[in-house]
Image (cartoon, grey):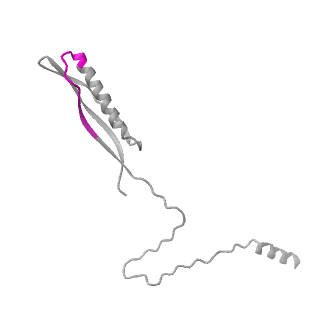
Amino acid sequence: MKKILSVVLFFASFQVFSAEVGVKVNQIDTYQDTTISIEKGKKNHYRHYVITDGEHDLSGDKDVVAKSAEINWKKECNEWKKEFRIDNKDNKIISVTCGKMSCVKEGVETTCSSQAKYKIKTLGED
């Protein structure tokens, strides 16, 4: 009998006490569907990103010498990339490319241009 009593007292000492939680639902309009939600701790907010891509016309300054026109286009390309990356505080840029350069001669002057492309992620609506 002593063994049974000691076993019962042993397990009774490990009993978990729970606190009573009361939620008052008086004066809640139940005419329409009603949902009551109880949450503890921080709510997880996940950011939803949208991938956006676009194009931009790049063209360097005209020059009489074709090699100089190519250098002008390269300067314009680098400047465009630099300005585009300045606004990359939140790592929004996925890719930036100046595209393939093509040069056109008009009279004695040559102009080099291309179709620049970019891909960025932007914060979408939840």
Residue located farthest toward the bottom when viewing the structure as drawn: 27
Q: Residue placed at 25% from the left, 25% from the top? A: 101
Q: Residue placed at 28% from the left, 28% from the top? A: 76
Which residue occupies the foreground of this view, 46 or 75?
A: 75
Q: Which quarter of the rendered picture does the N terminus lie within?
A: bottom right
Which residue occupies the foreground of this view, 72 or 123?
A: 72
Q: Is residue 23 left or right of residue 80?
A: right
Q: Is residue 61 left or right of residue 11?
A: left
| Residue 14 placement: quadrant | bottom right
Q: Is residue 66 left or right of residue 24?
A: left
Vertical placement of 35 versus 118: above or below? below
Q: Which quarter of the rendered picture does the C terminus lie within?
A: bottom left
Q: Position of residue 38 (x, y in %)?
A: 51, 71
57 falls in the magenta region? yes
Which residue occupies the foreground of this view, 94 or 72?
A: 72
| Residue 52 placement: quadrant | top left
Q: Position of residue 115 (x, y in %)?
A: 24, 32
Which region shows up in magenta?
54-68
Q: Position of residue 98 (x, y in %)?
A: 29, 30
Residue located farthest toward the left when viewing the structure as drawn: 107
Vertical placement of 37 versus 1: above or below? above
What number of labels is visible? 0
Q: Residue placed at 26% from the left, 37% from the top? A: 55
Vertical placement of 81 versus 21: above or below? above
90 falls in the magenta region? no
Q: Position of residue 88 (x, y in %)?
A: 38, 40
